[in-house]
Image: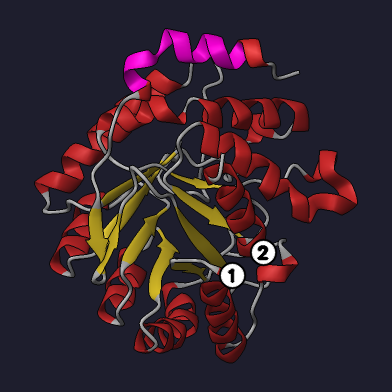
Amino acid sequence: MLSLEQLAGLLEQNRAAAAARVREFSIGGRKFNFNSQPAIMGVVNLSADSWYRESVCLSAESAIQRGRVLAAQGAQIIDVGAESTLAHAARASGAAQKSKLIPVIQELRAEKILVSVETYSPAVTRASLAAGANILNLTGTAGSKEIFKLVAAHDAAVIICYVAGKNVREVGDFDLCGDPVPMLRDFFARQIEIAQRNGVEKIFLDPGLGFYYRNLQDSAVRVRHQMNIFLNTFRLRELGFPICHALPHAFEFFGEEVRCAESFFAVLAALGKTDLFRTHEVPRIKVVLDTLKSF
C-alpha cells in the first residue's frame, strides 16, 4: 500500500531533483510553460488492433472528428498512430500507415490543431512531417540519426521513448533490478546527445510505461513498476527536458471501471511532476489536473 511516509522518504532522498526545471518551448507557434502548467495529449488510434476501443477510428473522417472533440475537451496535442504496439497486432507497412495518417494530419493541421505521430519508421516520419505533423512520438531506436535529422529539418519536436530494443514491436525484457531511474537516465542522456547533435532541441522524454514487455505480464509486477516510475519522474527532469507519460490501464484491477484507470494514474504522474500526459480520456484527466492545481 502506497503511504504518505513512502512519499516523504522519496522526496527527502531527492530534494535537489525535486527543484529541477525543464526547457520550455513553442510547438507550431504555441508556447508551452511546462514548469508551471502540464499539457495533455489526446490519442487517436487508426489501427483496428488497438484494444482501447473508444480511441479507435477506422476512417479518416471519424479520426478527424475525434481529434476535434479531444481538442475541444482540452487536449493541446493530438497523437495519431496507425500501428498498434500490442505484441500480437499485425504489422502495418509504411504505405498502409501513410495512407491512413496523411489525410488526418493535413485536416487537423488545417484547423490549427497540433499533431503528434507515433511511429518508428523513417519513411512514415518523413511523410508525416511533410504533411504538417508537429511532433514525432518516436517508439524505436533504430535509424534514430536519420529520424532526428528529419525532425530538425521541420522544426518539429520529438518524444524520445525508452525502448528496450530496436522498436516497440521488438522489445526484450525490462530490467527490473533495483532502482530503474539510473538506467533510464543513461538511455535518455545518450539519445538526447544524438538528437541535439543532429539539430533537435524540442525534446520530451517518455519512459515507455505503455509498452508490452514479456517480463511485465504479471499485473501486480507491472502496476508496481508503473507506479514507481510515475512517482520518480521528477528525478528524470534533472536531464533538463519535459517528461511525457502514456497513462496505463491496469484492467486486471479496474475491470469494468477500466476507463477510470488513467485518472488514477494521472494523480501519481502529477505528483511525480509529469509535464505531458498522453491519454485516451482527455476530459477525465483535465478534471484531475485542474483539481490538483486548485490545491
In front of the other: 265 or 58 = 265
From the viewer's perspective, is 252 left or right of 56? right
Residue beneath the point at 51% across and 40% down = 171
Residue 93 horizontal/vertical position (percent): 48, 72
Q: Is mark 1 on a helix, strand or loop?
A: strand
Label 1 Cα neighbours within 10 Å, binned few <14 / some 14-19 / many ≥20 = many
Task: Say above or below: 193 vs 159.
Answer: above
Q: For the magenta stretch, what is the residue range? A: 6-17
Mark 2 or mark 1: whose residue is earlier in sequence: 1
Q: Is residue 91 visible?
A: yes
Q: What element carries label 2?
A: loop
Mark 1 and mark 2 in contact (Cβ < 8 Å)?
yes
From the viewer's perspective, is 113 left or right of 257? left
From the viewer's perspective, is 68 left or right of 288? left
Residue beneath the point at 50% across and 82% down = 100
Task: Say above or below: 273 vs 97.
Answer: above
